[in-house]
Amino acid sequence: MTERVGTAYLAETLFEEKLMQAIVKARDALLSLQHPKGYWCFELEADCTVPAEYILLMHYMGEVDEVLQTKIAHYLRKHQSDHGGWPLFYGGKFDLSCSVKVYYALKLAGDSTNAPHMVKACEAILAHGGAARSNVFTRMTLALFGQIPWHGIPFTPVEIILFPRWFLFHISKVSYWSRTVMIPLSILCSLKPKAKNPRQVDIRELFVTPPEQERNYFPVRSGLNYAFLQFDRLGRFLEPFIPRGIRQRALKEAERWFVERLNGTDGLGGIFPAMVNAHEALDCLGYSAEHPYRVNTKEALKTLLVTKDDLAYCQPCVSPVWDSALSCLALQEEASDASREHVLRALDWLKDQQLTEEQGDWREKHPELKGGGWAFQFGNSHYPDLDDTAVVALAMYQANHERYVESVQRAADWICGMQSKNGGFAAYDSDNTHYYLNEIPFADHGALLDPPTSDVSARCANILIRLGRRSNEVGACLEYLKEEQEEDGSWFGRWGTNYIYGTWSVLAAFEKVNDPAYWSSIERAAKWLKSIQREDGGWGEDCDTYFLPERAGKGYSSTSFQTAWAILGLVSAGEVDSPGVRKGVEFLMRTQQTDGLWEDEWFTAPGFPRVFYLKYHGYAKYFPLWALARYRNLRSKKSV
């Protein structure tokens, strides 16, 4: 008996030593990646649509950087799948719209249509109905290049900028990303410019029916969508009769609107699609290439490029605030003297990024509310978001330093003021829930709106609870979260893949409540997380679950970041001593690389579920550290 106890003690001691070594290695690796200014900013990769669009942009403007084009083309070829096309995420199925854009980009870059990879791609595209069946945004690009007639895209007149608030459609009724994309795009759709396309490259081989003869660009999605399609046809019929004075007024107002939000070299809305549309709209409106606006929009797009020795790709945006705040939370859990000064440097940088007096679209609904949020990017002053604000405020609160007190209080005030009527919190707006607008022809992506979500709401509740904020706001949010729990015990993840992310987010908030009313929800969630653990001890969930919710929590392999989320969720539910958590920790220790970090091919989050996905390269760098440190601390009762 004594010998067995001694052996168990030695094994446990060895485990503790290895755990500490893993934490120290992960901490040192993360600290080494901090920018001299104090922030962290990791690569943010999307599917091949974005880099393909960069090539298309160069040919639209007639300004082709051959060296860059060669590198992007190499990246695109490298990511072609065995099915012949390109998916929306690593390991995903063929996506028609992405494949059409990539094929066109490669042909523009000089790839022969007889090359094996192009033949394979063409066959796959035709087998899925051809380019005419691609989504609205792809068809809009094709219309600009003269590959399909303008009646093949939704009627998007610039006059939408003049619609009154009471009308069925108003720009304030859609999300910030939809606004910033639509307004410059409406200028293009009204003036109907044509891409310069220096080599006059076409892709007629991608159409089953000649594009000018195609009559089925708009498959009917629902009865309401059918009604909107009739309005679309009526609007297109009436467009020639729009008085010239009204069109000119609308053009001027749309120009004023997006120019006011150009955001310097950080770009309109800080996101690639809006930045591209703004750059092309300025050209269409007659701004010269030397005009400061054009210079800035071009430079803004260049800042999104990731260029390496033999390849390059374009990011959809950058994530310094998000990466910095989450890195701080992981390092605060690690809680060593070596981390402390690095965290304070990051928080000082973040303090300077807080948006207090700046103008923002959110002020239209909340004119009396004082600012206090943070944006996701280096600069995006019109569009702070509640998710970033909640995590930055939490990191500052945990720092327990007087120089952050005012920043945290302003953030909390702003969060409270942005609560939606159902008790939840959205990313950028409140009560952005005009769901009927997802049925307009333009919105075939189904992501026109910014409604409240469980993950953002949970993080907002988390910081408000810690600050002891007003019980009405917190209570309404907790009830919203309770109602949003799925039948199996999980929560949907809008901004991270997927149910594992959503479940961790909510459990982290419920942990701070200590109210028996939520114990059943916590128990069900913990039971679900344990039920989906994989044989290797890790957790993994792929992006297919946004198409197939019955596969919630299931994936093709375990990942470091999802294993970390599951561990963080379970220990928040009081399961720190459960065998499943121990196995998850052992998985992370076993898969840690020699450099102290982790590496996963799998994508980490949706930009828009079912349409656009992201790979945050930072997730494999700070979430596993956070989980390992939290596990260690809770075992010794030192967790923050």
Image (tube, rainbow, N blue to C red):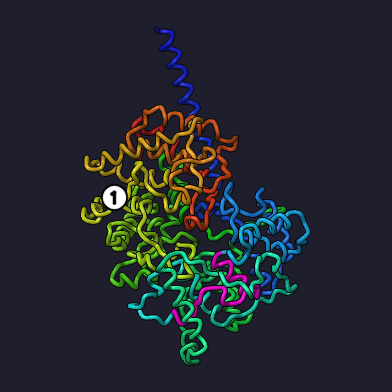
For the point 33% across and 32% down, the residue is: 637
Q: Position of residue 362 (x, y in %)?
A: 36, 68
Foreground pick, 93 / 368? 93
In the displayed structure image, the side of residue 506 where residue 19 appears, left or right: right
As drawn, 7 above or below 581: above
Quarter of the image with the N terminus is top left
Inspect the image, locate mark 1, and give the three-letter code of the amino acid beneath it: Glu
Q: What percent of the width, then of the height, locates residue 609?
A: 47, 55
Taking 625 as reference, is 98 above or below it? below
Q: Quadrant of residue 426?
A: bottom left
Q: Is residue 138 magenta?
A: yes
The quarter of the picture where residue 198 lies is: bottom right
- Secondary structure beneath disc 1? helix
The magenta segment is 135-160
Residue in front for this viewpoint, 528 or 325: 528
Q: Which residue is mark 1?
A: 483
Instruction: Pinpoint residue 454: horizontal percent, then vertical percent.
Output: 35, 52
- Image quarter hosting the C terminus: top left
- Answer few, some or many: residues within 10 Å of disc 1's Cα (few below 14, many 20 plus, some between 14 and 19): few
